């Protein structure tokens, strides 16, 4: 079994809290659930395989938490529609849950009612160093990073004031000078960490 070493937390400000949305309209009536699906793809999928050491939290409207755990994850495919179907099952599973208890949905996916502050507390309890990904943060390549790392990203919207409150005091990191799509940031973070783990960081061009 791989130990969890990389975590991503994606804030879905408009994604649905109830499962009555069509899989055919993820950007519209499913409130940009397409973004969260693409983030799941980038967080876990390799060319032929799954990154087992990754955990992904989706924070929906600041109230509902969906956790995907690479060690146990099954049925994650590259297409957005089937990923959305997995998330929809988790949202359906949440409907009769009491606040605060994690409940399993499909293999490797669990759900609970809770807030970003709960995710932060859970990650800190597991000794993750947490960084907020922001365009104006410090360039990730300029700093050394510990082993267990968590990164928080927003979706198509800016971080809301209540998000910033829950993230107070955490360091901000940037992956580059342009404002990028959330899933691209996840891919770049993975690549940066893969390069470091493979010892490629000192290779200079020309
Ligand atoms: C599409 S951007 C958010 C939208 C943007 N703030 C806006 O409203 O114009 C999605 C998220 O990706 C992350 N992000 C985008 N570009 C980044 C960069 N260059 N460095 C670090 N994180 C970045 C941030 O977490 C951001 O909130």
Image: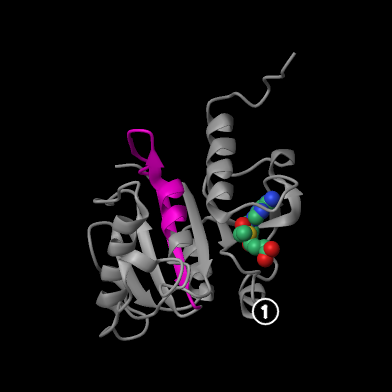
What residue occupies the far top of the structure in this picture?
Answer: 206
Question: Which residue appears at 23% of the width and 62% of the height?
Answer: 106
Ligand 1's quadrant: bottom right
Residue 131 shows up from this direction: no
Q: Is residue 28 left or right of residue 138?
A: left
Question: Which residue appears at 46% of the width and 47% of the height?
Answer: 42
**Residue 186: horizontal and vertical position, in percent?**
54, 48
**Residue 192: horizontal and vertical position, in percent?**
59, 37
Considering depth in this image, is 114 or 10 the residue closer to the camera?
10
Considering depth in this image, is 11 or 104 the residue closer to the camera?
11
Considering depth in this image, is 131 or 124 the residue closer to the camera?
131
What is the magenta range?
Answer: 37-61
Residue density around tag 1, few if under 14, some if 14–19, many if 20 or more, within 10 Å: few
| Pointer 1 residue | 161
Q: Quadrant of residue 181?
A: bottom right
**Residue 6: horizontal and vertical position, in percent?**
48, 48
Residue 187 shows up from this direction: yes
Q: Is residue 15 left or right of residue 69?
A: right
Question: Which residue appears at 38% of the width and 42% of the height?
Answer: 45
Q: Secondary structure at mark 1?
A: helix
Give the answer, above or below, for where 206 lies relative to 125: above
Which quarter of the figure is the N terminus placed in? top left
Q: Is residue 50 left or right of residue 123?
A: left
Mark 1 CB near ligand 1 (8 Å cut): no
Look at the image and name its color scheme.
Answer: one colour
Residue 36 drawn in magenta: no
**Residue 35: horizontal and vertical position, in percent?**
48, 60
Q: Is residue 14 left or right of residue 108?
A: right
Residue 43 drawn in magenta: yes
Which quarter of the figure is the C terminus placed in? top right
């Amino acid at each position: 079994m791989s130990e969890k070493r990389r975590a991503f937390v994606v804030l879905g400000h408009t994604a649905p809290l109830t499962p009555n949305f069509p899989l055919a309209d993820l950007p519209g009536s499913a409130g940009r659930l397409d973004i969260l699906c693409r983030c799941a793809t980038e967080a876990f999928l390799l060319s032929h395989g799954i990154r087992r050491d990754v955990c992904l939290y989706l924070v929906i409207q600041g109230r509902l938490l969906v956790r995907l755990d690479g060690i146990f994850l099954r049925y994650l495919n590259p297409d957005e529609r089937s990923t959305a179907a997995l998330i929809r099952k988790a949202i359906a599973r949440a409907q009769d849950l009491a606040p605060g208890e994690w409940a399993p949905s499909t293999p490797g996916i669990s759900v609970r009612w809770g807030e970003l502050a709960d995710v932060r507390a859970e990650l800190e309890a597991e000794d993750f160093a947490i960084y907020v990904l922001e365009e104006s943060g410090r360039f990730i390549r300029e700093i050394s990073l510990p082993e267990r790392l968590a990164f928080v990203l927003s979706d198509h919207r800016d971080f809301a004031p209540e998000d910033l409150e829950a993230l107070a005091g955490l360091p901000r990191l940037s992956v580059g000078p342009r404002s990028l799509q959330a899933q691209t940031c996840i891919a770049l973070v993975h690549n940066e960490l893969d390069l470091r783990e493979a010892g490629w960081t000192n290779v200079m061009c020309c």
